[in-house]
Amino acid sequence: MGNLSETIAVVRPEEVNQEEWLCGLSDADLLDAWTRDQFRPALAELITRYSVMVLSVCRRGCAREVDVDDAFQTTFLYLARSGGSIRHAERLPGWLQRVAQRSAVATWKKNRLPCEPIGDPSAVVEDPLVQLTHRHEAVVLDEELSDLPAKYRAVIVMHHYEATSIPDLATHFGTTVGTIRGRLQRGRKMLAIRLR
C-alpha cells in the first residue's frame, strides 16, 4: 500500500476540484473506492467530511495542540490502513468517533502530561472550574459513547455531532424513520445508564 502519510499528503487541490462529484457519493462508495482502487480523492473526501467531528473528539481528549494533531492524523491513518475491515460503511461516523477517542487516549498516555485536556475552544470566557468540569464531562461522554454498540453509536454521532436529520439518517441507513428514532432513543437510554 505504500507510505500512508504520503498517500494522504499527496492529494493535490486540483485533483480535489476535478472530483467535486465525490461530494454526492455515500460513505460506502467512497470507502470502497479507497480500499479497492486506492483512489486518493475518495479518502480526501472522507477526511473532509468527518474532520470537524474527529478534531472535536481529539481536542476533548488531548492536553496539547500537538497531541490533538497526532490523534487526528492517527485516526485517519487508521482509516486509510483499515478501511477495508469496516463491515458496515454506513456506520463510519461512529467508527471514526471511537477511533478518535481511542487515539486521543493513546496519545495522552504516551505523552503523560500533568495538565488537563484542552477541549473545544470556548466562545465565552467562564469560570475555570466550570471549564474544567465541562471538559471532564465531554471526555467521559466520548469514552462512554465509544463503548456503545456500533448501530447506536453511529446514529447518535451522526445526529448530534454531524447534525444529520432523522429522515436523512433513515435514508443513509436504508431503513425507516421509526427505526432511526428507536435507535436514537435506545442509544440515548444506554448512554444515560452508562453515565450514571
Image: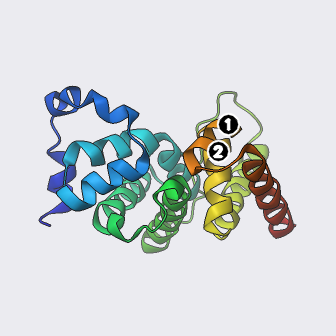
Image quarter for residue 12? top left
Q: What residue does disc 2 label?
A: 170
Q: Is residue 142 above or below residue 19?
A: below
Indicate the quadrant containing the N terminus: top left, top right, bottom left or bottom right: bottom left
Whole-percent x and y of residue 165? Answer: 67, 35
Q: What residue does disc 1 label?
A: 167
Q: Is residue 146 visible?
A: no
Kindly identify the amino acid type of the residue bearing the numbered disc 2: Ala
Which residue sits at x=22%, y=26%?
17
Whole-percent x and y of residue 175? Answer: 65, 50
The answer to the question of whether label 2 and label 1 lie on touching residues, with beta carbons closer than 8 A, is yes
Total number of numbered discs in the rendering: 2
Could you say which is closer to the camera, residue 177 or residue 61? 177
- Which secondary structure lies at badge 1? helix
Image quarter for residue 126? top right
144 left or right of 29 in image: right
Q: Is residue 38 above or below residue 131?
A: below
78 left or right of 50 in image: left
Kindly identify the amino acid type of the residue bearing the numbered disc 1: Pro
Local packing at callout 2 (Cα closer than 10 Å; few below 14, some 14-19, many 20+) is: some
- Which secondary structure lies at badge 2? helix
Whole-percent x and y of residue 188? Answer: 80, 56
